[in-house]
Image (spheres, helix red, strand yellow):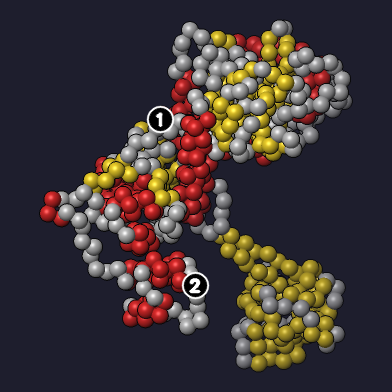
């Protein structure tokens, strides 16, 4: 922070600021015109030790209503306090915000309470939807308009097992309204018609956007077609897909591809799958397996039949007359169109001209296009469609919904932007576990049951043998005082997912030094918790050997030092690296290369087959025939 800004906020001159900081034992370099945020906070605290008198002390604390987001200037006006005083209090609480920046309700509530006010939330209706909320809306829609919808299918598998070839083979012969032959796909999803029924295929499993969408908790896939090459069998990415399907409870249909190859062995594939818990019907299990040759077009009809059969059993439904909602599967900016997004419609019907919002993007739908770039007037559930008309590009995994007017759409989008901005303003204490007991205790509160379930499922994947990740308590609704007291007694961190913390709980959390972390996106929550778990792992040393040399001559022996000569027998010897001293099978000591020469010329390294001279710092007496190992050891953090 600039000294000029800090002096202005504290309402004193820069020389006076330097003098008062020095009196408080805080040194500012004579030529410095900036200090870091930590020093700024210390200075503010030192110059603000006098207790602030609260207004209307005789009549009790004044009640103020605070909206979800408020600028520092508006906040000061609400409290009827000078802006400098409010900024001073913000700095003391680790928040560096200027007069025109926004803070969220939780931050403002803490500051207001510090200044002697009683706080209540000013409810402002927002139309922003979370993943769990949309899942509950879709699951609980039992209106008469609910009908069967096409299944949404993702084709996944190991690299080079034929995913793309299979997708192309299905697309070329079955795309709705298309002709067989070279069809250029327009977006990352398409529909096929088989036996007069539609199937929607996602063509994004290898894209980064798809991974991001999965990380955010969005799951639009109804079925996974797992492609396994008959001549190669189960591979690492095959296992990843199986684990992903188990985690998200999505049914699998196995497509055993490349059965036209001479060395194809479908039975071996089924055995390997059974070992992973994917037992095919032929082996007495419930998983459908179809033998295909994407290259020859063999078995495609049967595969599509099985997709429709499984879809019929799973009974996928949606309401085309309900509230229009969908999930963004990919997005980009296109010349002539601006920000565009590919969306899978999951409820209701989208029309050209509808006002929509998805994350921070909003606007009126200018155009709807299918996978072939054809203009559409509307899009019903399970339809993949490219939408143009957004103000900014939405993110993969954002939830799209229609709005009654452009003002409410803009307000919803701005709400998302303010949330993101307020998170960057907070100087939040990093989520930490107990290093001594290697435990991370959490108390989780979420907005709805769907969100809570998604979080629990995601955290289940972080379980391991070394660190204990324990959910002490979980529930729906705002963080209350009971949650804080439980967190304090169990040394837990409180996680608030798309929910608030009531003012009394905020104040109690500060007194009890309980960390309350607020999240709006699942993948951010998972990143922080994963990082906290990894930090609790016991680090290990990684030993890297560069080369070895044999001692052929001893030239000089001094106290703590020796000069020797020899020949490099493998790799290379490097100066300034550690040196292991070996005699037979035993390491007899360690040393450090002080000087290294080749043909009496100083060098940093000597390669295999070359002779060397070396001055070694070591207390160990080296003998002719000993082996010198050049190596380094680095501290390596374990990963999940």
Q: Does residue 268 appear in this view?
A: no
Residue 129 versus residue 502 in the image, above or below: above
**What's the distance in space between the residues labelled 1 and 2, CA to CA?**
45 Å
SS at mark 1 in the image: loop
Rendered location of residue 434, percent (x, y): 39, 54
Along the viewing direction, whichever of 406 and 121 lies nearer the viewer: 406
The outermost residue toward the left is 58
Rendered location of residue 156, percent (x, y): 69, 29
SS at mark 2 in the image: loop
The dot on residue 494 is: none
Relative to 144, is 172 on the left or the right? Answer: right
Contact check, label 1 and label 2, Cβ < 8 Å: no
Q: Does residue 610 appear in this view?
A: yes
Place residue 474 in its image quadrant: top left
Residue highlighted by disc 1: 448
- Residue in view at x 62 percent, y 91 percent: 559
Across the whole image, how many numbered discs are drawn on residues? 2
Residue highlighted by disc 2: 34
Residue 437 versus residue 12 in the image, above or below: above
Place residue 502 in its image quadrant: top left
Rendered location of residue 428, percent (x, y): 42, 54
Along the viewing direction, whichever of 555 and 208 lies nearer the viewer: 208
- Residue in view at x 53 percent, y 13 percent: 321
Relative to 357, is 240 on the left or the right? Answer: right
Graded by Cα atoms within 10 Å as few (under 14), some (14 to 19) or many (20 or more), the crowding at tag 1 reads: many
Residue 69 versus residue 325 in the image, above or below: below
Mark 1 or mark 2, which is nearer to you? Answer: 2
- Residue in view at x 66 percent, y 36 percent: 339
Q: Earlier in the sequence, mark 1 or mark 2?
A: 2
């Amino acid at each position: 922070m600039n000294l000029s800004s800090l002096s202005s906020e504290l309402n004193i001159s820069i020389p006076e600021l330097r003098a008062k900081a020095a009196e408080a034992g805080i040194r500012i370099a004579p030529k410095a015109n900036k200090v870091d945020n930590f020093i700024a906070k210390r200075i503010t605290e030192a110059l603000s030790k006098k207790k602030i008198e609260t207004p209307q002390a005789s009549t009790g604390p004044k009640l103020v209503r605070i909206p979800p987001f408020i600028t520092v200037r508006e906040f000061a006006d609400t409290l009827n306090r000078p802006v400098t005083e409010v900024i001073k209090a913000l700095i003391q609480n680790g928040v560096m915000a200027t007069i025109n920046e926004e803070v969220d309700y939780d931050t403002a509530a803490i500051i207001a309470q510090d200044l002697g006010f009683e706080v209540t939330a000013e409810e402002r209706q927002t139309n922003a939807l979370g993943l769990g909320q949309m899942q509950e809306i879709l699951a609980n829609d039992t209106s008469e308009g609910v009908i069967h919808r096409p299944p949404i299918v993702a084709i996944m598998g190991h690299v080079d097992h034929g995913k793309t070839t299979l997708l192309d083979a299905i697309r070329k012969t079955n795309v709705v309204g298309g002709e067989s032959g070279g069809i250029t796909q327009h977006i990352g999803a398409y529909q096929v018609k088989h036996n007069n029924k539609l199937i929607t295929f996602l063509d994004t499993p290898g894209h980064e956007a798809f991974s991001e969408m999965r990380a955010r908790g969005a799951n639009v896939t109804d079925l996974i077609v797992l492609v396994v090459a008959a001549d190669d069998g189960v591979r690492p990415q095959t296992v990843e897909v199986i684990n992903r399907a188990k985690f998200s409870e999505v049914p699998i249909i196995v497509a055993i591809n490349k059965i036209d190859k001479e060395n194809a062995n479908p039975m071996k594939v089924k055995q390997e799958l059974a070992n992973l818990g994917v037992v095919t019907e032929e082996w007495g299990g419930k998983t459908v397996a179809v033998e295909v040759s994407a290259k020859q077009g063999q078995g495609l009809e049967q595969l599509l039949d099985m997709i429709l059969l499984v879809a019929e059993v799973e009974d996928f439904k949606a309401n085309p007359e309900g509230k229009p909602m969908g999930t963004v599967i990919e997005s980009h900016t296109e010349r002539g169109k601006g920000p565009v997004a590919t969306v899978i419609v999951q409820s209701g019907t989208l029309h050209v001209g509808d006002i929509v919002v998805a994350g921070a993007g909003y606007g009126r739908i200018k155009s709807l296009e299918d996978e072939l770039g054809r203009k559409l007037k509307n899009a019903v559930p399970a339809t993949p469609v490219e939408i143009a008309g957004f103000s900014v590009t939405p993110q993969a995994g954002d939830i799209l919904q229609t709005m009654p007017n452009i003002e409410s759409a803009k307000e919803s989008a701005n709400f998302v932007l303010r949330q993101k901005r307020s998170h960057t303003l907070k100087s939040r204490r990093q989520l930490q576990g107990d290093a001594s007991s290697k435990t991370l205790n959490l108390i989780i509160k979420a907005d709805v049951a769907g969100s809570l379930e998604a979080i629990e499922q995601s955290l289940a994947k972080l379980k391991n043998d070394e660190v204990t990740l324990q959910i002490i308590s979980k529930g729906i609704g705002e963080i209350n005082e009971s949650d804080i007291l439980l967190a304090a007694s169990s040394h837990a961190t409180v996680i608030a997912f798309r929910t608030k913390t009531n003012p009394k709980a905020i104040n109690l959390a500060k007194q009890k030094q309980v960390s309350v972390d607020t999240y709006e996106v699942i993948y951010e929550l998972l990143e922080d918790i994963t990082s906290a778990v990894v930090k609790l792992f016991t680090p290990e040393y990684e030993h890297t050997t560069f080369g070895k040399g044999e001692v052929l001559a001893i030239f000089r022996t001094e106290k703590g030092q020796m000069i020797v000569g020899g020949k490099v027998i493998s790799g290379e010897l490097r100066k300034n690296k550690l040196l292991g001293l070996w005699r037979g099978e035993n390491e007899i000591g360690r040393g450090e290369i002080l000087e290294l020469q080749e043909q009496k010329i100083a060098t940093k390294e000597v390669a295999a087959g070359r002779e060397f001279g070396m001055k070694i710092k070591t207390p160990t007496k080296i003998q002719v025939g000993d082996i010198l190992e050049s190596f380094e050891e680095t501290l390596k953090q374990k990963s999940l």
